[in-house]
Image (spheres, rainbow, N blue to C red):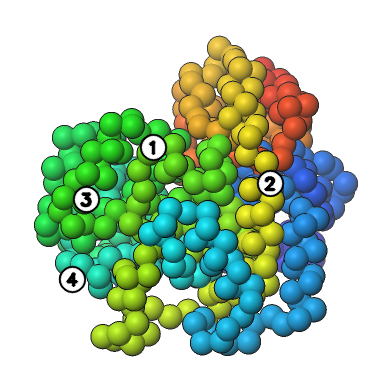
Amino acid sequence: MSLKDLFLQHTAQTSDHPVGIEVAKAEGVYLYDTNGKRYIDLIAGIAVSNVGHRHPEVVAAIKNQVDHYMHVMAYGEYVQQPTILLAKALADALPQHLNTSYFVNSGTEANEGALKLAKRHTGRTQLIACKNSYHGSTHGSLSVTGNETKKHAFRPLLPDIRFIEFNREEDIQHITEKTAAVIIEPVQGDAGVRIPSLSYMQQLRAQCTATGTLLIFDEVQTGFGRTGSLFAFEQFGITPDVLTLAKGMGAGLPIGAFIASHEIMTSLKHAPMLGHITTFGGNPVCCAAALANLKILQGGLLKDVHTKGALFKTLLQHPEIREVRGIGLMLAVEFDSFETVHKIFHECLKNGVVAFWFLSCNNSFRIAPPLTISEDEIREACDIILQSIDNVC
């Protein structure tokens, strides 16, 4: 029985049409299959491998930590150097009030923790999210995800959720003294890379402050340099009360975090004690990788992200392309239909480029490569995409 047959028979499937590349190796911006075929990876594991696959400094940090210890205790009990150093490095990189990190294993867990924290700290129950948002697939984060297609089979979900239109200023008035938190992506990802106005974001911050509502920024996808700054909120001149992170945080290892002030985070210590708990959160190997990843990003990697994103926009000109939206290296290439995107995706795959569509905007495909991609690699990838469009359209 082939490896692919075993994959289909013994691992739970998420759809009837997995991409199915049999991965043998990954390096930099490339994937290699078991036949030696090379692919330019334009999605980086869905905005995960921001510093490239197997960055040597990350690999060295992982190997060093494995030589000392791996998992030793559930989160929050033992003093573990990699976890503490990562928390301090994040505090140093963030505004002063975002100084306390709670480490988890994924983006949906980070959002689950943030929602619990908001309810516990404010004593309120209402949560506000945006239509077309995506915050994860576990019950709480799914409850604040604005895509009914993903949700209807799993109802009932959390009560007291209200959805407003993303980037519509008049909807901000729905945030009141009854609202525990607003959870929002500074740039909507799964909706097809939707960028809000500066005015909207600043009014949102002002209304949350006026009503005592916690503003949660879900930067699971936008964080760690994807949009050209370490965190996307830096480009709007405002700060959240709670920040959630994952994806690009661990350079390929599973880690997430929700971050707030020490005062707010203290809410989870009592009434009840262990108000939030995780066995594997703050795993020392993952934290070592994340710390190395952060140092690489802070070492100058971000200075060319906007230039590289602009190059994609300049090169991806074709009569079939309706629009290229994006900020930094977080881009959406829009076509007339999912059928067109699906054909182009498979043709690109055949020709050695990996892209993928958005679940909530399936007439667009995403481009979110490692931030280490070179201009020559961008040109090669765009040539393949344009040729693939010509071949199928």
In front: mark 2 or mark 1? 2
> Residue 340 bears which disc, if any?
none
Name the residue that disc number 1 marks.
236
Disc 4 is placed on an element classified as: loop
Mark 4, other Cα within 10 Å: few <14 / some 14–19 / many ≥20? few
Q: Is residue 295 left or right of residue 137?
A: right
Q: Which residue is mark 2?
A: 299
Identify which residue is drawn at 75% across, 65% down: 61
Reply above or below: 171 against 87: above
Q: Visible in this render: residue 340?
A: yes
Image quadrant for the C terminus? top right
| Residue situated in front as seen by the camera: 75 or 34 | 75
Q: Which picture quadrant has residue 392?
A: top right
Real-space CA distance between mark 4 and mark 2, rounded to the nearest whole angstrom = 41 Å
Q: Amino acid at mark 1?
A: Phe
As rendered, which of 227 and 360 lies closer to the eye? 227
Q: Please provide percent x and percent y for residue 135.
A: 40, 54
Distance, label 1 to label 4, CA atoms, is 29 Å
What residue appears at the point 76 percent right and 53 percent down from the top-left corner? 55
Counting residues from the start of the chain, the first of labels 4 and 3 encountered is: 4
Q: Amino acid at mark 3?
A: Cys
- Earlier sequence position, callout 1 versus callout 4: 4
Q: Earlier in the sequence, mark 2 or mark 3?
A: 3
Picture residue at 57% right of the left edge, 73% below the top: 84
Pointer 3 residue = 208
The span from disc 4 to disc 3 (Cα, nearest Å) is: 15 Å
| Amino acid found under the numbered disc labelled 2 | Gly
Q: Residues within 10 Å of mark 1 (few under 14, many from 20)?
A: some
Q: Residues within 10 Å of mark 2 (few under 14, many from 20)?
A: few
Mark 4 touches mark 3? (CB < 8 Å): no
Q: Secondary structure at mark 3?
A: helix
Which residue bears the numbered disc 4? 123
